[in-house]
Image: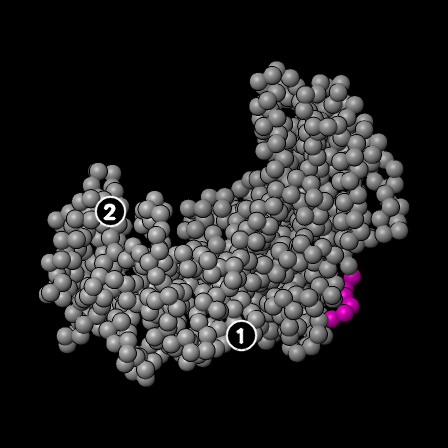
Amino acid sequence: MPSSTPSGAESVRAAARAATVNDAIEAWAVFEQFFVLSYRTGEGSPMLVVELSIPSAAALGISPDSAASDPGTFARLLHPDDRDRVLAEHWEAAAAGEALVSEYRMVGLGGNVLWIYDKAVPVPDVGGTTTLRGHCLDITPRRDIEARPVQAGEHLDSAVSNIPGAVYLCACDEAGTIKFFSVQIEDLVGYPASDFIENKVRTYDSVIHPEDLPYVVAEVNEAVERGAPYSLEYRVIHVSGEPRWVAEHGRPVFGPDGKPRWTAGMILDITRQKAAQKSRELFERQSRRQTLHDSLTGLPTRVLFRESLTHAIAEASESGVELAVFAMNLDRFKEVNDTLGRETGDGLLREVANRLRSVLREGDSVARLESDEFAVLVPEASRAQALEVMHRVRGAIDPPFEVEGLALHVEASIGIACFPRDGYDADSLLRCADTAMYVAKDTKLGHAFYDASVDTRASKRLALIGELRRAIDEDELVLHYQPKLAVRSGRVLGVEALVRWQDPERGLVMPDEFIPAARETSIIKAVTQRVLELAARQWRAWADEGRSLPVAVNLSKRDLVDPGLPGEIAALLSRWRMPATVLKLEVTEASIFNDPHSTEDVLERLGAMGLRLSVDDFGTGCASLASLRRLPIDEIKIDGSFVSAMSAREEDEIIVRSMIELAHNLGLSVVAEGVEKRAVIERLAELGCDVAQGYYLSRPVPPEELAIWLDQHPDSGAAVPRKRKFREEPVGENLASA
């Protein structure tokens, strides 16, 4: 709202901006505070009320239901002196397919008059006709200011005291003289409104950020010249020196001579919204990069590698050349992780990635698919050339790796698949290379080309599924429980149930050895049912002992598309006399968006039952927090790969902080997984994280050991324990159950 005098804006620019749908009606704060109703109409058709706000319904003396069902409601609300004009200009705009901005009066209960700001846009339909759709805002306070600028004073201060922004009236003179400013301006810039009245102490231009002032001046002057409303966002400088973002919405007011007399409007503080938007955009960029590039090694992920492979196959098909794909797995890497710790394991993976980069040919590419599995793309390569590259890769892996002062010797199993002999698409080649890798591992040969005649992986998987069915029938599945603690108080908030297979011959089998195979078949449903049953039974045992301990259980993508799941869980809760509020269901991003329609239906039904829903491993998939808003999600769990690297990698801390802030903005609680150091949990407390879970607090333990841990752990108000109190069983990176 700088000095506003008509300036010769270029006609082309004015015409372009006149067509831009960007004014006060689209400002969220104005819309929420002053929304009256929305409507639709067509040429010669009644103006039908689509939505009516509850406060406006009371003020106008009508009900939302009757307004929507009665086609004559809108016309009856119009002031008799304005009715013919308003109806005619709306029908004309609909006939011409043009946007419309209008101001007029409505008459409410007891003859109360409301001034309406109406903005409508044409929406063509498939039949070729045009519907005009619009929204109405209550601008009565602003009209009061325009009508009585000289007597503004205390009366207008009172009239606008509850408006969530600074209301102003500014003369269209060279100085941009302020005639009225509501007291809210002091909240925005730190100077009292009296400083600005008649430009007594300072002008409003003086508090606009110098970089934004030319833009603000140009926009307001152009709107005044066109006689149109204006809506813009810019920065002001608070008396403290702090820049703040504001949204200004106003319009010119013309005198009897047709010349602009005032600009009147409102200025809203949108600093928090801008900060949230910036954080959201940063998170989305980082999330996209995380989807395509592994944060630990910087290598492409499976998603990006598959895209590159698909492109390379298309080029090879066109030019008639061959290519090769390697799948490489580090042998006994799990032992490094379990014996020396995850940080050492991460350091080893980084060094492996660096060596692989250094020995590949120009045009070759390497990716980290998961954990200790890598893939290499060798374009334009015959079988002999692929073998040559494979030997270079093995030569890079053979020398010992220096990690944290330790010399680590690792070996690799490499499977090779060739196009076009072994497959014609990316998925087929990756599967064949993966199969060949397991052959290399099983035969101890170090490498193997894919051979369909010795593809034994499928038969092994079938054998495993058969054993798992027997294990379920013979009650060999058991649950270990990992506590979740409030980050600030250290209070135990619940546990996560994690499945194990107590095999009579092999001992305790970890989930990463059987759950991936189970997920590929319908047996995962039986696993989930068994885990839910065991968890509910254990909860009842704890409840009978006087322990209040909510339990979380993992679901698979197959579970989420099963329409019978909500009914089965309802029966389970009834059978064990278990309140829905103490059972939390954890689902992954990939599971949610595998079949969005079916998944959303099941999640809605589960949420309606009172069950709490959590998104597990958040940040490892393609979902955004915004995409989760329509689902009944209560919580996100930040993947441990981000959390464990916080203290060493600034970009991971930025990602964690962004996730926490954005989740809280959406009303979600946040759990940090993979907490392995005290420094990490202390930093999580500073970032405002709600709940922590990880080996630093406790590994997953059997129920009887958890009972001892709970007895020794204070309920609240104490720091998290410094020492683990139980044996550290070998646990793989993938602790998810189903």
Give residue 58's quadrant in the image: bottom left
Looking at numbered disc 2 in the image, what kind of residue is underneath it? Glu
Query: Is residue 725 one of those drawn in magenta?
Result: yes
Q: Nearer the viewer, residue 258 or 155?
A: 258
Identified at 80% across, 51% down, the residue is 344
Query: Is residue 174 one of those drawn in magenta?
Result: no
Classify 10 Å Cα crowding around label 1: few (below 14), some (14-19), many (20 and above).
few
Identified at 64% across, 75% down, the residue is 489
Q: Is residue 314 above or below residue 344?
A: above
Q: Tell me residue 514's x, y (percent).
A: 65, 44
Q: Tell me residue 367's x, y (percent).
A: 68, 37
Q: Earlier in the sequence, mark 2 or mark 1?
A: 2
Identified at 56% across, 74% down, the residue is 240
Q: Which mark is residue 630?
A: none
* Magenta-drawn segment: 721-727
Q: Secondary structure at mark 2?
A: loop
Residue under label 1, please give it: 239
Q: Is residue 359 above or below residue 512?
A: above
Give residue 679's quadrant in the image: bottom right
Q: Which mark is residue 98?
A: 2
Q: Tell me residue 242's x, y (percent).
A: 56, 69
Q: Is residue 497 visible?
A: no
